[in-house]
Image (spheres, rainbow, N blue to C red):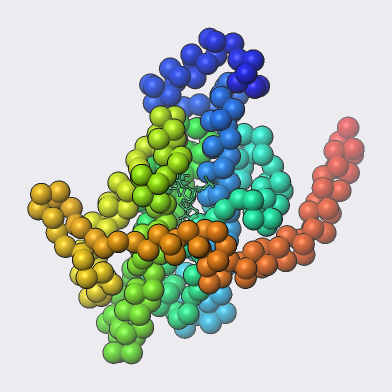
Amino acid sequence: MSSAVADPTLAARFEATVAAKERIEPRDWMPDAYRKTLIRQVAQHAHSEIIGMQPEGNWIGRAPSLRRKAILLAKVQDEAGHGLYLYSAAETLGASRQELTDLLISGAQKYSSIFNYPTLTYADVGTIGWLVDGAAICNQVPLCRTSFGPYGRAMIRICKEESFHQRQGYELLMTMMRGTDAQRAMVQESVNRFWWPALMMFGPPDDASPNTEQSMAWGIKTHTNDELRQRFVDMSIPQAKALGVTLPDPDLKWNEHRQSHDFGEIDWDEFRAVVKGDGPCNAQRIAHRRKARDEGAWVREAATAFASKQKELTR
Ligand code: BYC
C-alpha cells in the first residue's frame, strides 16, 4: 500500500510501533521510504554474504589439512545460508531474489567493500574470520533488534553462526602464531592488509553518512557507523595483544578522557573508490557472480517446471 494514500491511523500506528521499539511486520502498513531503505540495506547485506563466499571459497581446494578444509567448507556454506535468509526477508518487502540479483550484477546495488580485496595467503582465512566476521558481529548484533521483524529474526541466527566464524579465524591465527617464524610473518602481513579495510566495513563517518539519521529514527539502525567502528577498535586491541600481532596504525592509543582508543585517519578516498567499483577485485567478483547466475538458469527453469507440474497433479 502506498504511503500517499495512507489512512492517518495507519501512519500513527507505524510511528507508535517504532517509538515503542516493537516490530513492524510485512503485513503492516509502512511508509514507502521505510520499505525502500530496508530493501536497499537488506539486499546489500544479502549480496555481501553471497559475494563474501568468493574470497574464502578461493582457498577450499588448497586448505592445508582435512580439518581446515572441513571448517572452511562449513563456513562458506553458512554464508550462502545467510544470503538466503536475507533474500527471503527482502521478499517479504516485495523484492524478488532474482530481481535483486540482477541489480547486483548490473552494479545498481552494492555489497560490502571488504570483499573487493584479494585473499593472497591461507592466513587471510584466519584474518577474515577474526577481523571481518568480528566487524560483522559488532555491526549485526544490534541489528537483531532492528524494527523490521523478518530482518531482526534472520540476524539472530546469522549472529550465532558469525560467532563461530570469528572463533575459527582466531583459532587458526593463534595456531599459526605458535608455529614457525614464517607463519608468524604470514599472519602479520595478512593483518596489515585487512585492518584498514575492516574499519571501512562500518561505512562512512557519521557526518558523511546520508542514511544514518533517518534509519535510526525508524529503528532500522540502532547505532551510528562511528559508534560501532569505535566498539570494534576497542574490542580488537586486547585480542591483537593476545595473538601477538601489531595493528598497522601508529596512532592507536588509549584515551583516558574518552575511555576508548584513538586511532588514525581512514583513507576515505580508497573507500569511495572501492565502493564505486574500482577496488582490486570488483570486476572479478561480479564476473564470477554473473557466470554462476547464467550457468544456474537451467536449474531454476527445471525447478519451476517441476513445481508447476506437481501443482497440476495435486489439483
Ligand atoms: N561497503 O549512509 P550510509 C559478512 C554505502 S557480510 C559498500 O552510512 P547505511 C560476511 C551505503 O550502502 C556483512 N558500501 O549507509 C560474509 C550507502 O549507499 P547507498 C555485510 C557501503 O546503510 C561473508 C552509502 O555507502 N554487512 O558478514 O545507513 C564472509 C552511504 O552509507 C559500505 C552488512 O551488510 C561498505 N562498507 O549504513 C564473512 C550489514 N558502507 O545505497 C563475513 C548491514 C556504506 O545509499 N548493513 N556503504 O548508495 C548496515 O549495517 C549498513 O547498511 C551500513 C551502512 C552500516 C553498512
> Which residue of the protein is positioned furthest toward the front in this rendering?
269
| Picture coordinates of residue 47, whole percent (x, y) | 58, 54
| Picture coordinates of residue 145, whole percent (x, y) | 40, 36
308 over 1 or under it: above or below: below
Residue at x 36%, y 45% (from the top left corner): 206
Residue at x 32%, y 48% (from the top left corner): 226
Question: In which image quadrant can residue 181 be found?
Answer: bottom left
**Relative depth, front residue between 275 and 96:** 275
Question: In which image quadrant can residue 185 be found?
Answer: bottom left
Residue at x 60%, y 15% (from the top left corner): 6
Q: Quadrant of the N terminus?
A: top right
82 over 215 or under it: above or below: below
Q: Quadrant of the C terminus?
A: top right
Residue at x 44%, y 33% (from the top left corner): 214
| Picture coordinates of residue 264, whole percent (x, y) | 26, 63
Question: In which image quadrant can residue 42 be found?
Answer: top right
146 over 238 or under it: above or below: above
| Picture coordinates of residue 27, whole percent (x, y) | 60, 24
Q: Can residue 234 be seen in the rendering of this structure?
A: yes
